[in-house]
Image (tube, coloured by chain):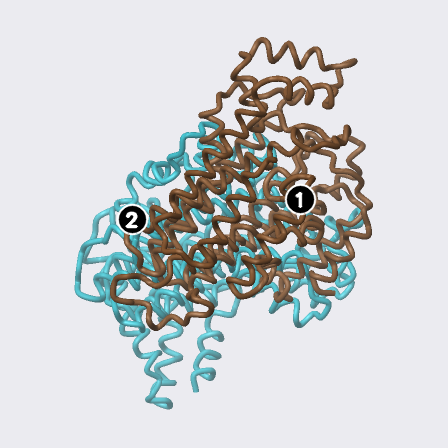
Chain colours: A cyan, B brown
Amino acid sequence: MASCCRRWLRGCSWRPAAPSPGPGSPGCTGPCGPRAAAAAVAGAQMSCFNLVKSLRSAFPNMYSISRFHHTTPAVCCYSKTRSGEKYTDPFKLGWRDLKGLYEDIRKELFISTTELKEMSEYYFDGKGKAFRPIIVVLMARACNIHHNNSRDVQASQRTIALIAEMIHTASLVHDDVIDDASSRRGKHTVNKIWGEKKAVLAGDLILSAASIALARIGNTTVISILTQVIEDLVRGEFLQLGSKENENERFAHYLEKTFKKTASLIANSCKAVSVLGCPDPAVHEIAYQYGKNVGIAFQLIDDVLDFTSCSNQMGKPTSADLKLGLATGPVLFACQQFPEMNAMIMRRFSLPGDVDRARQYVLQSNGVQQTTYLAQRYCHEAIREISKLRPSPERDALIQLSEIVLTRDK
Amino acid sequence: MSLRQLLKRLTYFGASGPPRRPLDTISSVVSWRGQSSRSPAHWNQVVSEAEKIVGYPTSFMSLRCLLSDELSNIALQVRKLVGTRHPLLTTARGFVHDSQNNLQLRGLVVLLISKAAGPSRVKASCQNYDMVSGIYSCQRSLAEITELIHTALLVHRGIVNINELQSSDGPLKDMQFGNKIAILSGDFLLANACNGLALLQNTKVVELLASALMDLVQGVYHENSTSAKENCITDDIGISTWKEQTFLSHGALLAKSCQAAMELAKHDAEVQDMAFQYGKHMAMSHKINSDLQPFIKEKTSDSLTLNLNSAPVVLHQEFLGRDLWIKQIGEAQEKGKLDYAKLRETIKAGKGVTSAIDLCRYHGNKALEALESFPPSEARTALENIVFAVTRFS
């Protein structure tokens, strides 16, 4: 029954011409304003709503569907009654709790060795968007409100935001050495400035600081949840080293790698703050599922942007993933249409001309569209999950965020 | 092919030739080349006795996770490095080569001190832990975690700086690949350590070991900075700075692990502190002993390069004053190349070696003092024997 319903839902958002988040709508944080955003969301849901209304009479036990639609109207109404800029932008809403985030992280990295300290602090300069910490604090508030209408964020929950950002950064530092990357966030990478040996140590230092902060929270469940992330990050990199011969396995392999490298951190951080804020295991699961789905969608769109962003903005493609020998979503989908790509995938685009040819195939195929559609499905799943929580500005911000994930263009 | 089989094969390849760095990643840190050339069997004896006391041989403790994990395929990746000059190969080979000398010293010490302390005098709050050979399973787990952390950083020490490579190092892509595997293997070991820590369900222990890791990273950083200097001239540091840095790179992990082992058995702060002191001083004297080996062995292999930031040399410099020391280095150079044999003789003629021996014994005595608060037992005797083995220079 549930799968039948899903097919209906899929049916209504499948048409590439009319996806719910269009280029200029939800998540657009500027002059578009909340009403256009809410209207667009509502509009998309309306088409589903009509379809599903007829379903509901046929399947009266579609509990999850009816709950979904009880909550979405609330989204629209809620944004209207609570006007005011501060509730429209999830990032602004989240940042209220994250003031001093980078200073606090730097305090955790307080060591006497000057150069090592400098290296470790390098990416905590306040210039990042802090996507993960924002999700974490919004989730913390959403869970706290859901549990007992508490309008506070516990100090330990805020610490999780720091830890998530630190673990993420530590993995970036190591990844940059592994990929021999020269620039990140508009500046030189740690390995290019100080060398590979020291860069690896800086990554280890950040990780150890994150672990100390984690231990100090004093909650063994939370420690278990977040150490899982560390293992997943490493396994994700190993998955990337290996490859699958079988086409069918390749996609599963890709999704597993995507989960481990990107989504696991977000999913488990969300779960950790929910554990700290609320004793209900159902809420922990909701938080985890939201984080996981948003995380996967985030990475899928990232992989799409590797093909599309530069040709729009810079006029010159980078195809960073192809150059690393990685076959991401768009490539795997394109391969279904152009089996000639199989050989290139298996040799990891190592021959001269492979990267360009692969890129051409992808752009000719509907690989990008299919990957985007898949990301949409994950986002919808995320929204479906988070909508189970009690309405709050933070919960709505999380809904908005998952749409922002889809529409960003770097 | 399992990792164990692979490692055994590596000893026969020997393709990479002598280590290209003055400091073999292993020898500076862990390898124990025997107490002195006159009684090489003594150390082995001490260790094998100790292993009997704790119930099983502790070699390969940290590698168990690598051996049993098919997903990571680390063995396969390391195999690709055979024939290259990447230091990771030397590190991997060291695990087999030195296994007779029991590389995994820290784990053994943690197990021994757990046994020596026994159950807490306070009402046993870990009755639900199973005890085998007088050691709780959580303490055994901790010993393994300690080795994992140590090995992870050992592997991470072997990363090479790409822009310092020369054509004699071989193809760039081999070195890059080696770096990749080294980083991932080290991270894998750390991830396993973190998981192990989480399973202990004790946040204080997690904090202790995490801070030990932070100390270790800083210690390795200092080591790297010094060995990278041009002409390998000693840093301008005195012995007290040397002690601080050596505590970070060698003492912290063992000291804090010993303390954590006590915490797991719910011993009070005093006992924890004594365990910490033993770990710290024993590690220091072990390091100083290791530093002294080139100066006290009868037969000196001339090709062996000296670590100019080892205890005897730092002390020698401190006695002489920096300028005179730089002058001596200059005198030992022939056409810009350092004659290590000559330099060794110069240092032996000074006061550095004898005061290093004194320092080693000083730390050994502090370690023994810390042990006095533990009740007499086989395990305590084994810990004492380790100190005796490490401070014997006759």
- Which residue of the protein is positioned furthest toward the front in this rendering? B394
Q: Is residue B147 left or right of residue B35?
A: left
Residue ID at (31%, 49%): A159
Residue A355 vertical position relative to residue A332 in the rendered view, above or below: above
Residue occupied by mark 1: B39
Chain label for disc 1: B
Residue occupied by mark 2: B270
Judge the density around disc 1: few (<14), some (14-19), many (≥20) Cα neighbours within 10 Å: few
Quarter containing the N terminus of chain B: bottom right
Amino acid type, residue under disc 2 in the picture: Glu
Chain label for disc 2: B
Do callouts 2 and 1 mark residues in contact (Cβ within 8 Å)? no
Amino acid type, residue under disc 1 in the picture: Ser
Residue ID at (66%, 59%): A331
- Return the x and y of residue B369 as percentages of the image width and height: 39, 42
Residue A175 vertical position relative to residue A26 in the rendered view, above or below: above
Query: What secondary structure is found at the residue carrying circle 2?
Result: helix
Label 2 to label 1, Cα distance in Å?
A: 37 Å
- Return the x and y of residue B35 as percentages of the image width and height: 62, 42
Quarter containing the C terminus of chain B: top right
Label 2 and label 1 in one chain: yes
Quarter of the figure with residue A95 = top left
Mark 2 or mark 1: which comes first in sequence? 1
Judge the density around disc 2: few (<14), some (14-19), many (≥20) Cα neighbours within 10 Å: few
> In the image, which is nearer the foreground, mark 2 or mark 1?
1
Residue ID at (77%, 14%): B334
- Return the x and y of residue B67 as percentages of the image width and height: 64, 63
Residue A189 vertical position relative to residue A174 in the rendered view, above or below: above
Residue B92: in sight, yes or no? yes
Given residues B250 and A76, the one toward you in this image is: B250
